[in-house]
Every structure is written in structure tokens, then in C-alpha cells.
Image (cartoon, rainbow, N blue to C red):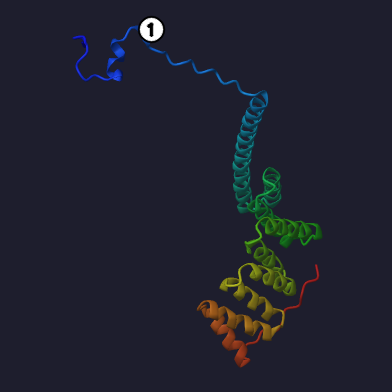
Amino acid sequence: MVSARFPPGAVYADLVPFLPSFHRRPAPPVPERLEHPAQTGVRLTLAMAALLCSALLLTRGVQALRADALRTQADAQTADLNLDAALTLSRQATRLTPDDPAAFLALGQSTRTLWHLRRRDDLRTAAVAAYERAAALSPADPQALYEQARMYSFARRYPEAVRLLGRALERDPNNAGLVLELARDQEQAGRLDASRASYRRCLTLDAVPECDRSLERLTSGAGVPVPVPQETK
């Protein structure tokens, strides 16, 4: 006979709450899993590495901000014609961020300006070193090579400018502006056939009016410039 306490048809699971406590089997306690000392050491090592990486990134970020501020100050000094002060600030920026191509490009610009004024070999060498460092740090960007070419073109050393523009075009062969600069310097260097070819190449890349006018002038033979004497320093 079923007790009135239990409804007819009840299954064991329904009756568990009504059974005496000695019928219930408590779940065995889950033993605490102890970590092997080697695993603890690995975790600590990874945590320390993460902290060091964070500190390094923070330091580099601060240095980059300081370098940007120095370059801004250098630009202001250049605008005020304090060129030696601008060069000093640009050098300080490269020491803070030795892997930043923009810092070395700015250093090249500051040094180039002084070289144009003073024509000292040490300044030219320093400018070249800065531009080459910028080019090495950013191997796909032609700007550092282009700026170095402009340095020689301004000094009327056209063969060196042509060589550097050729290197720049290896990085960006479809840049019509670079091809136009190359054609100009080839023309000034007296390499007229090469200049015509470059002006034609420029027109295939973009409809640049100067390329069209210069090509017509060189093809007709009218107004061909006399090559400018090259500087030797």
C-alpha cells in the first residue's frame, strides 16, 4: 500500500526530497587541482614578458611623441633661418627614434639646406647618409631618393640626380612626377634622347602639359637648352 504522502505513479526522482537523509548520497568533494611548479613558472614568465612589452611600447610611444615635437621645433627654427639649431633638433629626433624613416628624412632636409648654403663636404656626406638611412628604413617609398636627387639637381649635379631618380623609379615606376623630374635632369645633363624618351613615358602615365610641351620642343629642335656646367663639389 502506497503512503498518502506520495502521489500514485511517482518515480524515485520525485520521491528523493521525501526520503530520509541517510538515503541521499552527497556529491563527493572536487579535489583541488594543484598546479605543477613548472607550470607556475611558465605563467610568471609570460606575465613578466607581457609587462615588459607593455613598458617597451609605452616608452617607444613617448619617444615618438618627443621626436615629433623636436621635428616641429626644427621646422620652426628653419622658418626663422636658425639652420644650425634646426639641424641639432633634427639630430636629437633621430636619436630618440632610430628606426623612423620620417626622422631621417627630416634630418636630410635640414642638412641639405645647410649644404646648399655652405657647400661643405661633411654636410653633403651627412645629408646623403640621412637620406640613405631613410630609404633603407622604408624600402618601398621613393621620397628619400627623390629628395636626395633634388639636392644634386639644385646644385646642378645632374648626372647624380639622374642616377637617384632612376633608383626612385624602381620603387614607384608609374609615378609621372618622378618621370618628369628625370626628364628635366636628363635634358639639363645633355642626354636629349633619354630626355625625350622620359617625356614620352611621362605622357603615357598622365596628361602632364609640361611633358607634352617639352617633348614637342625637343623633337622640333627649337629651344634646346645648353647643358649647364656641372659643379664638382
Q: Position of residue 66 (x, y in %)?
A: 62, 41
Q: Position of residue 76 (x, y in %)?
A: 60, 49
Given residues 35 and 98, the one toward you in this image is 35
Classify residue 15 by image quadrant. top left
Given residues 198 and 112, the one toward you in this image is 198
Q: Position of residue 170 (x, y in %)?
A: 66, 70
Given residues 140 and 19, the one toward you in this image is 19
- Residue that lies at the very extreme toward the bottom in this rendered image: 220
Q: The disc labelled 1 sits on which kind of residue?
A: Phe
Helix, strand or loop at label 1? It is helix
Image quadrant holding the N terminus, namely top left
**Residue 116 visible in the displayed image:** yes
Classify residue 154 by image quadrant. bottom right
Q: Position of residue 158 (x, y in %)?
A: 72, 74
Given residues 179 and 157, the one toward you in this image is 179
Count of marks placed on residues: 1
Q: Is residue 59 left or right of residue 207?
A: right
Q: Is residue 103 left or right of residue 26?
A: right
Which residue is depicted at the point 52% across and 77% down? 208
The answer to whether 53 is drawn above or below residue 8 in the figure is below
**Mark 1 sits on what residue?**
22
